[in-house]
Structures are given as structure tokens and as C-alpha cells.
């Protein structure tokens, strides 16, 4: 997708806004602002991958054998993503938040994280050109 | 680094070189993501029980009886042990454990295997301890299903932590073909 244009950007930003809307609604409708943590977690989820991605050495070593820091970044990213999905479920299970708020914050968090993944996948080509 | 040696090593029994590097790399990434997910799932399973216990209340129709049991520090011990074991196992250099001569001296291999053994012992101890807590604290006293869930969550936390360690180990040694054949 080298020519992912302005339409992709608009679509992704729209989906991102819908995701944040879902999360904020899930907090505001029941006036319990704990699900806002889900937004924070999903925004922070790609951060370990991004931080550790360039620790993997040069292009010659990362081709066929992954390195420790890259693995650590992937491990932490997966951990944070599962945390983002598990936190509303746990809160709803112990009746801190309502099940409706749980479902809405999970959907919203999924939309936010999906937007981040789709954005980095759609614009990966142009990023690697600049490096 | 050890690939050409292992091809004619007469001690190796199951040996079939893994054909494609790109598939191996993909498997490695997926495995590490899976291990991270399992790790978070394990800890959240137990944290769910802990939070549920902290917010436990009497049944709505009979508000006089307080909950008979809570998650206390005893329940946290097996998880902490498994966590330490996971850390220790993954801090070991895997090429050193494999014990190829010429890589390091023999004492380093011996020490690496000892530390690896301690790590696995910690994980197994965590699993056994969680089963012990489940039986002694919850099952034998015949609490309601709602409270026995704490013990089962503890066991599943430790099982998932052990699975996470196994998946991480296998996926990190995909590039060495020996462990890959063990995993299949």
C-alpha cells in the first residue's frame, strides 16, 4: 500500500475518534471513570515494540535471527494488549463497572488499537524509505 | 553458530533440519506474542480472583453472612515463585545450556544448567504450591463454588505461566533445529 492516500488517513482518524468516543461514553454514562485506563493502555501498547525495534542490531543480524531486546518488546506488547482486554473484564467481574461499560470499553479499545496497527501497517512503506 | 557442528554430532538422535528461515522467523514472532499474551492472561486470572475477593460481599438475599474466606498472601506465593522461575529460565543463555564444547568452559555450562534447574524447580514448585493451596485452603474446607474459584484461578495462573515459559523457550530456539524437533 504505497499509495495509501488521504482517504486512509481520514478513515483511520474517524475510526480512532469512534473508539475514543466509545471509551469515554463507557465512562460517562455510568459516571465511573475507571474504563478510561483502557484507552491509556491501548495507546501505550505499541510503545515497547517501537522502543525495542531499533535495538535489534543492524540489518545483517536481524534478517535470520531475532535478538533479545526485540523479543522483549514483542513480549511486552502482547502483555499490554492482553491487559487492555482483561482489565474491563476483571472490573466487570468484580462489579466495579457495569457489563455495558465493560463491553463498550473493550470495543472502543479494540478500535483504537486496530487503528494504530492499521496505520503502522499502511504507512510502513513510506517510513522505511526515509530510513 | 553451532549449526555445522550438530549435523554430524553422533549423540543427536532426532535430527531433521528445519527447511525455511522465513517461516521460522514468523513462527518465532508469533510464539513470542503468544507467550506474552499467556503471561498477561495468567496474571490477570489471578488478579481477577484477588480483586473479586477484595470486593466480595454477602449474597443480596442474605446480607448477614460475611464472605468466609479471602485471598491472602498465601495465595500470592505460588505465583511469585512461578514468576521468579520464568525470569530465571529466560535469563539463561540457551547456547550455553546446550553444552557445545568450545563455546565456553565446562564450568560455565555446569553453572548454566544448575541455574536453569533452579528456574524449573521454582516453576514446578509454584505449580505444586498452587495445587496445595487449592486443596488445603479451598477444597477441603468445602467452601461454596464462588470461593473455590480463587483456588482454581491460582492453579490456572501457574499453569499458564508455565505454558508461557515453554512457548517462549520453544519459539526462541526455533532457529536451532534440535529444540524445534523436540517441540514437535
Image (cartoon, rainbow, N blue to C red):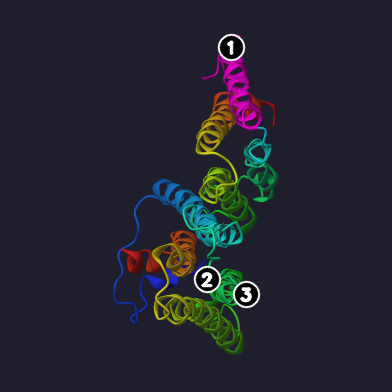
Q: Quadrant of the C terminus of chain B?
A: bottom left
List x then y, in percent, for residue B153: 46, 64
Q: Magenta span has A18?
A: yes
Q: Which residues are magenta?
A: A1-30
Vertical comparison of A121 with B182: above or below = above
Quickly name the residue at label 3.
B73
Residue A79 image point, x, y percent: 57, 51
Against A37, is B64 above or below?
A: below
Tell me what residue is drawn at x 60 percent, y 86 percent.
B111
Q: Earlier in the sequence, mark 2 or mark 3?
A: 2
Q: Nearer the viewer, residue B148 or B152?
A: B148
What's the mark number on residue B68? 2
Residue marked by disc 1:
A5
Q: Is residue B152 above or below residue A32?
A: below
Q: In this orientation, which residue lies closer to the viewer: A98 or A61?
A: A98
**In this rendering, the label closer to the viewer, 2 or 3:** 2
Horizontal relation, residue A7 to residue B16: left or right: right
Q: Residue at x 62, y 50 (%)?
A: A73
* Front-lying residue, A16 or A76: A16
Left or right side of A129 for B59: left
Amino acid at each position: 500500500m504505497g499509495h495509501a492516500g488521504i482517504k486512509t488517513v481520514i478513515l483511520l482518524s474517524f475510526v480512532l475518534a469512534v473508539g475514543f468516543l466509545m471509551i469515554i461514553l463507557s465512562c460517562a454514562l455510568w459516571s465511573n471513570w475507571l474504563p478510561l485506563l483502557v484507552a491509556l493502555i491501548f495507546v501505550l501498547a505499541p510503545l515497547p515494540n517501537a522502543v525495542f525495534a531499533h535495538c535489534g542490531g543492524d540489518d545483517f543480524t536481524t534478517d535470520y535471527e531475532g535478538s533479545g531486546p526485540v523479543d522483549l518488546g514483542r513480549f511486552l506488547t502482547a502483555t499490554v494488549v492482553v491487559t487492555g482486554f482483561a482489565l474491563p473484564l476483571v472490573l466487570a467481574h468484580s462489579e466495579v463497572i457495569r457489563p455495558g461499560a465493560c463491553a463498550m470499553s473493550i470495543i472502543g479499545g479494540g478500535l483504537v488499537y486496530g487503528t494504530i496497527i492499521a496505520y503502522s501497517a499502511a504507512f510502513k512503506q513510506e517510513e522505511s524509505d526515509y530510513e | 553458530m553451532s549449526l555445522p557442528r550438530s549435523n554430524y554430532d553422533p549423540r543427536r538422535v532426532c535430527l531433521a533440519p528445519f527447511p525455511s528461515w522465513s517461516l521460522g522467523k514468523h513462527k518465532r514472532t508469533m510464539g513470542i506474542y503468544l507467550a506474552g499474551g499467556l503471561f498477561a492472561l495468567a496474571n490477570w486470572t489471578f488478579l481477577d480472583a484477588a480483586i473479586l475477593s477484595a470486593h466480595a460481599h454477602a449474597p443480596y438475599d442474605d446480607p448477614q453472612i460475611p464472605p468466609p474466606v479471602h485471598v491472602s498472601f498465601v495465595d500470592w506465593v505460588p505465583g511469585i515463585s512461578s514468576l521468579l522461575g520464568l525470569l530465571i529460565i529466560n535469563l539463561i543463555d540457551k547456547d550455553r545450556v546446550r553444552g557445545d564444547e568450545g563455546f565456553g568452559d565446562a564450568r560455565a555450562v555446569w553453572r548454566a544448567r544448575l541455574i536453569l534447574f533452579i528456574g524449573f524447580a521454582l516453576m514446578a514448585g509454584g505449580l505444586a504450591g498452587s495445587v496445595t493451596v487449592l486443596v488445603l485452603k479451598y477444597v477441603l474446607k468445602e467452601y461454596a463454588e464462588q470461593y473455590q474459584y480463587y483456588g482454581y484461578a491460582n492453579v490456572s495462573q501457574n499453569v499458564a505461566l508455565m505454558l508461557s515459559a515453554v512457548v517462549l523457550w520453544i519459539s526462541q530456539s526455533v532457529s536451532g533445529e534440535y529444540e524445534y524437533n523436540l517441540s514437535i
